[in-house]
Amino acid sequence: MMNTNDVAGELQGRHIVLGLSGGAACFKAAEFCRLLAKAGATVQVVMTEAACQFITPVAMQSLSGRAVYVSQWDARPGNNMAHINLSREADAVVVAPASADFIAQLAQGRAGELLPLLCLARPVERVPLLLAPAMNREMWAHPATQRNLRQAMLDGAQVLGVAYGDQACGETGDGRMLEAGELLEELVAFLAPKPLLGERVVVTAGPTFEAIDPVRGITNLSSGKMGFAIARAAREAGAEVTLVAGPVHLPTPRGVRRIDVDSARNMHAVAVDKALAASIFIATAAVADWRPAQAAEHKIKKDGSGEVPQLAFVENPDILAEVAHSPRAQSGELYCVGFAAESENLEANAQAKRARKGVPLLVANIGPATFGRDDNALLLVDDEGVTELPRASKRALARQLVAEIARRVSGAET
Ligand code: C5P
């Protein structure tokens, strides 16, 4: 899940209709509403009568800063057509929680209350409808619910999925509503442009860990933040993304397939295999150049003699160079992007590394100035020359970089 402290501007200028139907998950809708506002969206809350049993319209009004709509007979709109006005203003309608009954109403095209009515009245091509189901696990698994969900999807709704876990009823299973941060991440991704639709992207990220013995090893200061942000941005851009992650403590971006690895050899085995079936490979990982020639089977003991262990090293395989020299990469079917963490002479070092690795695009940054931080500055070096992406959050830079990659990939395809 995304860092919910860091959502400012994600939905700037967007107007969201947030619908609540009845369910214990209404309390999460309150947090979601707060996050939407924090992300810069204006939020119009619409609640069903059942939702009002779980949380008050007053609470939702104070969080959204707008009077809540419940009834289709609300006399406030001059034309008395709340369902038309509300649905036409929205960039998206998000129903969270979407109860089993609400989904059944949608599937049948029923319009007995304002919320299903405005969903039915919305211009389907222009105003997307996202559903965050929430219900007991048996209700979720029931064929009628699954049938209704399929029908709602066929009719154009986007279903955000459910989580597994403890439920308000005391049971455990599928059917929990996603958390507020997850809902926001899904909505932001849904609304993002899709220049990488149909692409398969593999990203390596983080450090590697080279074992000395069962309890010690050599690693580096890479946090994985840049690579994770790129994986997220690529998914938002419509790609199917696999993230090969070294040992880091970062949450997996939603919709991204993550494979955890530890050593460089481990990362090599997974990343090469996945990259050779992909269309874009982005190597952000700080892979250890060398590993101890032999990892001791047992912990190396200090015996009091003052003798220190002697470590010999061997070179690790170069994942990026190997992928970039594969026939698929050489023929242009697979677009490779390398990273270079330098401490000086950014441009000259980047040019040299680009040639050495044999990649069309090399992205350089100052290593010590970026490791572990939330911001960065990038220098893109390719055939066109040098493009500077000035200091910004890694999230913003990842989006810009993905747009730059998409432009180059689509340029190569046309
Ligand atoms: O040679 P250097 O480590 O500076 O190259 C950095 C680039 O190569 C990064 O994109 C990094 O992910 C990749 N790399 C790799 N396998 C290695 C070493 C580096 O994929 N063994």
Image (tube, rainbow, N blue to C red):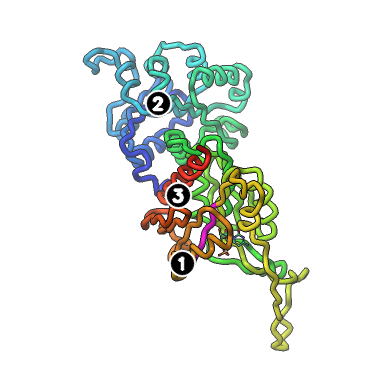
State the residue at coordinates (66%, 51%): 326
Q: Residues within 10 Å of mark 2 (few under 14, many from 20)?
A: many
Question: Where does label 3 land, which residue?
Answer: 401
Residue placed farthest to the bottom in the image?
Answer: 305
Residue type at mark 1: give it: Ala
Q: Quadrant of residue 47?
A: top left
Q: Is mark 3 within 8 Å of ligand 1?
A: no
Q: CA distance from mark 3 to mark 2?
A: 30 Å
Query: Which percent across, then down, holds residue 114?
Result: 37, 16
Question: Where does label 1 land, which residue?
Answer: 348
338 magenta-colored:
yes
Q: Are marks 3 and 2 in contact (CB under 8 Å)?
A: no
Q: CA distance from mark 1 to mark 2?
A: 50 Å
State the residue at coordinates (43%, 50%): 395
Q: Secondary structure at mark 2?
A: strand
Q: Secondary structure at mark 1?
A: helix
* Earlier sequence position, callout 3 versus callout 2: 2
Compared with 304, 63 (above or below) is above
Residue type at mark 2: give it: Val
* Earlier sequence position, callout 1 versus callout 2: 2
* Span shown in magenta: 337-342
